[in-house]
């Protein structure tokens, strides 16, 4: 996995992701129940890791982006519970930690950053090596919406707004390319600076993600030594509904 974020993009990502909190209590519940240290793969700037350590959960946090890791280290530097987190830059398909975890998580569609089936299988194989026999793997991906996928390139959509140095920043995205044979979508993440009636682009980053269908993922999990304990559509309900998110709670065989 390559580092797709420069310094400013990592900072902007951190600021724009602050309002996503719908999965925090979900992961905290499983982390508390696991009774041990949690491994978070694709930790980014600590959106999930930091709330976990603030509740006394030990976390090993891994990300392939040097700039994401840099932001995370700065954020935890003065936290009272900073001793509960170990931060490592590494590729989740290859990293070797010489320890096992009761819970491994990949929040907010990290699995979709694996751009082909070989990478997905390498990741699952490596995750299994780091998971205790009765441990859990939890990750989420979006349910492929064929209507959206068939209308790429798409119109630009605004995601959120926030303030940085007294200036309004607007984040948007546009799906500008699709590779149907490889099931990948290229999305431009755009940040605008809005000040005194003027608007300019301060960052534009192309991100490639791979969409996967439900039974394709189930097959991949089975091939790589996992079974599905639960398949959910969000972080509150206890059932699966077609068309929403796919949250996989998996055990190892």
Image: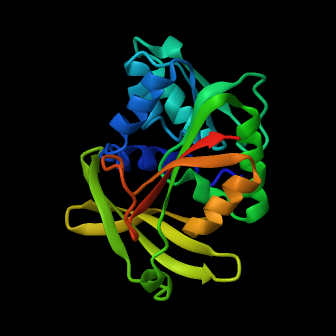
Q: What is the quadrant of the C terminus in the image? A: top right
- State the image coordinates of residue 232 (x, y, percent, origin top left): 42, 53
Q: Quick one: which residue is furthest to the left in this view? A: 196
Kindly identify the residue that appears in the image at 43 percent across and 23 percent down. 32
Kindly identify the residue that appears in the image at 48 percent across and 18 percent down. 77
Q: Is residue 164 visible?
A: yes
Q: Quick one: which residue is furthest to the bottom in this view? A: 151
In the image: residue 182, left or right of residue 174:
right
In the image: residue 149, left or right of residue 223:
left
Q: How is the image coloured?
A: rainbow
- State the image coordinates of residue 177 (x, y, percent, origin top left): 57, 81
| Front in this rendered view, residue 166 or 238 | 238
Q: Quadrant of residue 96?
A: top right
- State the image coordinates of residue 118 (x, y, percent, origin top left): 79, 60
Q: Is residue 61 visible?
A: no
| Front in this rendered view, residue 127 or 225 | 225
Q: Quadrant of residue 79?
A: top left
In the image: residue 45, left or right of residue 225:
left
Asked if 176 appears above or below 93 in the picture, the reply is below
| Front in this rendered view, residue 70 or 141 | 141
- State the image coordinates of residue 220 (x, y, percent, origin top left): 70, 59
Asked if 25 appears above or below 168 in the picture, the reply is above
Kindly identify the residue that appears in the image at 70 percent across and 76 percent down. 182
């Amino acid at each position: 996995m390559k580092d797709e974020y420069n310094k400013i993009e990592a900072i902007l990502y951190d600021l724009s992701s602050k309002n996503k909190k719908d999965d925090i209590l979900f992961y905290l519940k499983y982390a508390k129940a696991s009774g041990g240290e949690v491994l978070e793969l694709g930790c980014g700037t600590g959106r999930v890791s930091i709330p976990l350590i603030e509740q006394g959960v030990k976390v090993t946090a891994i990300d392939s982006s040097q700039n994401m890791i840099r932001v995370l280290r700065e954020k935890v530097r003065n936290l009272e519970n900073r001793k509960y987190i170990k931060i490592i830059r590494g590729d989740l398909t290859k990293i070797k930690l010489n320890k096992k975890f009761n819970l491994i998580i990949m929040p907010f569609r990290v699995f979709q950053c694996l751009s082909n089936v070989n990478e997905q299988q390498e990741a699952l194989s490596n995750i299994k090596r780091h998971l205790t026999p009765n441990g859990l793997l939890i990750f989420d991906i979006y349910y492929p919406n064929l209507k959206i996928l068939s209308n790429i390139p798409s119109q630009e959509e605004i995601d959120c707004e926030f303030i940085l140095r007294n200036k309004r920043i607007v984040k948007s995205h546009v799906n500008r390319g699709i590779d149907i044979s490889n099931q990948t979508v290229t999305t431009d993440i755009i940040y605008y600076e809005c000040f005194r009636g003027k608007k300019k682009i301060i960052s534009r980053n192309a991100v490639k993600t791979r969409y996967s269908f439900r039974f394709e993922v189930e097959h991949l999990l089975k091939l790589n030594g996992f079974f599905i304990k639960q398949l959910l559509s969000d972080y509150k309900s206890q059932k699966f509904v077609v068309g929403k998110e796919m949250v996989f709670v998996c055990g190892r065989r």
